[in-house]
């Protein structure tokens, strides 16, 4: 189970401008035909201007969820989800013009996360860590995939002998 970042933007918006921007982003459709996707969930930090935004978006019947990151500071929050990133569970689309590089819109995202905590801007770090933690805690994202159960035929086909753990009983 992995996460793909399909869009991101960073701007300093006051509440009156933030609400229409969130709604505009929610209305965006990604892909075409049977492959098209919409935003499933709007995750908003349950602090400061986020409280009013959450209430306003709920009244507009949008799928918004309040999220409180707790008392952990930003470095601790990044450490909590760094294993998800280290295991290759976060994907970014590749540039069609420059294979091996991310798309232009994702360069700032990657740069900010890689430069943290030495950078003065950390909005992408906040968004990324909160989203990854929410997805992990909600059970939508796992670090280790479930082990496949092999039957006796699988072992025979591979020329292996099935060994039981004597301490497991």
Image (spheres, helix red, strand yellow):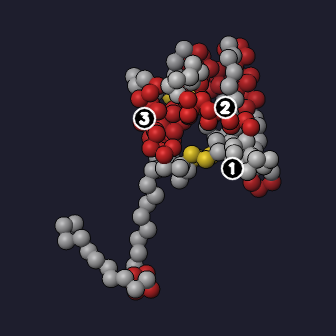
Q: Nearer the viewer, mark 2 or mark 1?
A: 1
Q: Which residue is mark 1?
A: 100
Q: Mark 2 or 1 closer to N-term?
A: 1
Q: Nearer the viewer, residue 39 or 78?
A: 78
Name the residue at 62% across, 36% down: 110
Relative to 147, say whether 120 is above or below.
above
Query: Real-space Cα distance between discs 2 and 1?
Result: 16 Å
List x then y, in percent, for residue 77: 44, 30
Q: Nearer the viewer, mark 3 or mark 1?
A: 1
List x then y, in percent, for residue 105: 73, 35
Mark 2: secondary structure: helix
Q: Tell me, yes or no, if residue 127 can be seen here.
A: no
Q: Quadrant of the C terminus?
A: bottom left
Q: Mark 3 or 2 closer to N-term?
A: 3
Name the residue at 51% across, 43% down: 85
Within 10 angstroms of label 3, few (less than 14), some, or many (20 or more) residues?
A: few
Q: Which residue is mark 2?
A: 108
Q: Nearer the viewer, residue 32 or 120?
A: 120
Q: Which residue is mark 3?
A: 79
């Amino acid at each position: 189970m992995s996460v793909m970042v399909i869009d991101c933007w960073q701007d300093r918006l006051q509440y009156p401008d933030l609400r229409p921007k969130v709604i505009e982003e929610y209305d965006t459709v990604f892909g075409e035909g049977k492959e098209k996707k919409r935003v499933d969930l709007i995750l908003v930090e349950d602090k400061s201007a986020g409280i009013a935004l959450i209430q306003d978006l709920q009244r507009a019947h949008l799928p918004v969820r309040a999220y409180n990151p707790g008392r952990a500071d930003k470095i601790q929050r990044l450490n909590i989800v760094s294993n998800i990133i280290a295991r290759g569970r976060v994907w970014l689309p590749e540039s069609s013009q420059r294979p091996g590089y991310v798309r232009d819109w994702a360069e700032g995202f990657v740069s900010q996360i890689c430069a943290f905590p030495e950078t003065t801007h950390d909005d992408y770090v906040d968004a990324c860590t909160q989203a990854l933690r929410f997805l992990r805690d909600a059970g939508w994202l796992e670090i280790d995939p479930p082990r496949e159960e092999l039957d006796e035929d699988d072992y025979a086909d591979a020329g292996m002998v099935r060994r039981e753990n004597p301490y497991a009983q």
